[in-house]
Amino acid sequence: MRAWAQTQNLHWSCPALPPSPAQAMAEVMALVGDWPDTGCAVVGSSLGGFYAAWVGQQRPNWRVGLLNPAVSPARDLAAYIGENRQWHAPESSFFFRPEYVTELQRLHAGRLSDAPRWMALIAKGDEVLDWRDMLARYGLGRVLLLGGSDHALSDFARWQPEFTRHLLSTS
């Protein structure tokens, strides 16, 4: 996505977020606080998709793109309280605190609205999240329900053109 954004001469931001969901969303909202009300998009994958849905509700004119988005991270991550390894950098660790579960509960985006703003790529082959839950929660707008793939959307390049068209659309 970064390389694509650079070819489109778009502003790109993908900050490393802290383990605290409340702090993470405070940092994101501070980062985008002076961004325009229109002409922007938010994208997230997995827990980032859950976060992107929350940001999308805060910014009701932005386009939203979700990639295998988490549906109930408060429920799912409660089992990971304690020391954990970074998924993308296993040599690094972080501590997931019990209060983060409550923070995740507070960040639930509620009922999603304005279907044309939303698009989700959901893989039936996701080995981490249940595609049926993702579809039920995030299936209000455009959905690409992939017959296979995986949680990381290893075949994302195949779907990226359609996904990015949605992000750039003005209708």
Image: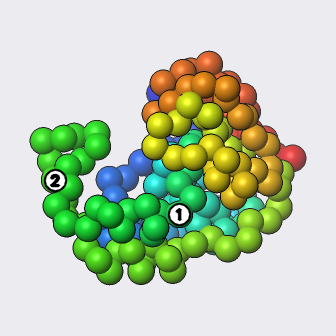
- Tell me if 23 is positioned left or right of 110 in this view: left
Find residue 93 and name its label: 2
Identify which residue is drawn at 57% across, 46% down.
Answer: 130
Residue 107 vertical position relative to residue 90 in the rendered view, above or below: below
- Of the residues shown, which amino acid type is indicated by label 1? Ser
Residue 84 vertical position relative to residue 132 in the rendered view, above or below: below
Count how many numbered circles sit on residues in the image: 2
Label 1 residue SS: loop
Which residue, given by chain and number where applicable, does mark 1 sit on? 72
Residue 132 vertical position relative to residue 102 in the rendered view, above or below: above
Circle nearer the N terminus (2, 1): 1
Task: Judge the density around disc 2: few (<14), some (14-19), many (≥20) Cα neighbours within 10 Å.
Answer: few
Q: Residue furthest right?
A: 171
Find residue 96 and name its label: none
Q: Compare residues 147 and 90 and report the one nearer the observer.
A: 147
Identify which residue is drawn at 56% across, 31% down.
Answer: 125
Is the image coloured rainbow, by chain, by secondary structure, or in one colour?
A: rainbow
